[in-house]
Amino acid sequence: MRRRVHSDEVKAAALQKLAERGVTIEDIAEIAYVMQSPYNKGLTMEDCVASVQKVLEKREVLHALLVGIELDTLAEKGLLSEPLQSIVESDEGLFGCDETLALGSVLGYGSIAVTTFGYLDKDKIGVIKRLDTKIGKGVHTFLDDLVASIAASASSRIAHRMRDEEENGNAQVNAG
């Protein structure tokens, strides 16, 4: 009989894998801050960290992280079969499976998350750029896109919360 994996174990494993790859919640929050601060003057890094932490509570996001990081790790060790080994190791431009895995996890956060992910995939910033350009220092074919998806999802959460607060504030003013 297979054991059922508790969500706390999945989250701990995913966070450990991120840490092993040199990615912190703060690194991801910085990207969310850059993406949302032009639209929210009162935005703080603490808001962004909290949003990233909420995104990292979703099982689908955690599963995507575990799968993607595992594939990157296997490629680093040369353990994938050819031609997949060469494709992942070189982060071949037409591969697309890395973006597809990452995109799947942003879909639950709406169009802002999807468009922000597309932007971050094209114009890599912060830790995403560092991961994408680590030539000879590890394979991050999946991880750079997964980090972009988490940052995009956190950005979308912030945008939606800001809109909700505005609407609730206006409703309270109109009611008073």
Image (cartoon, rainbow, N blue to C red):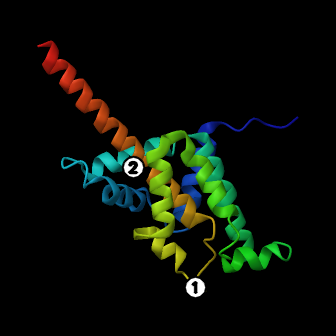
Horizontal side, residue 95 vs residue 146: left or right: right
- In this rendering, the answer to whether 70 lies above or below 55 is below
Q: Residue at x 50, y 59 (%)?
A: 118
Q: Is residue 161 visible?
A: yes
Taking depth in this image into account, of 17 and 121 the one nearest to the observer is 121
- In this rendering, the answer to whether 24 lies above or below 174 is below
Q: Secondary structure at mark 2?
A: helix
Horizontal side, residue 71 vs residue 2: left or right: left
x, y (%) of residue 64? 64, 52
Quadrant including the N terminus: top right
Q: Quadrant of residue 28?
A: bottom left
Upstream in the sequence, badge 2 or badge 1? Answer: 1
**Residue underneath mark 1:** 135
**Residue underneath mark 2:** 155
x, y (%) of residue 7? 62, 38
**Three-letter amino acid code at the position of disc 1:** Ile
Taking depth in this image into account, of 169 and 30 the one nearest to the observer is 169
Quadrant including the C terminus: top left
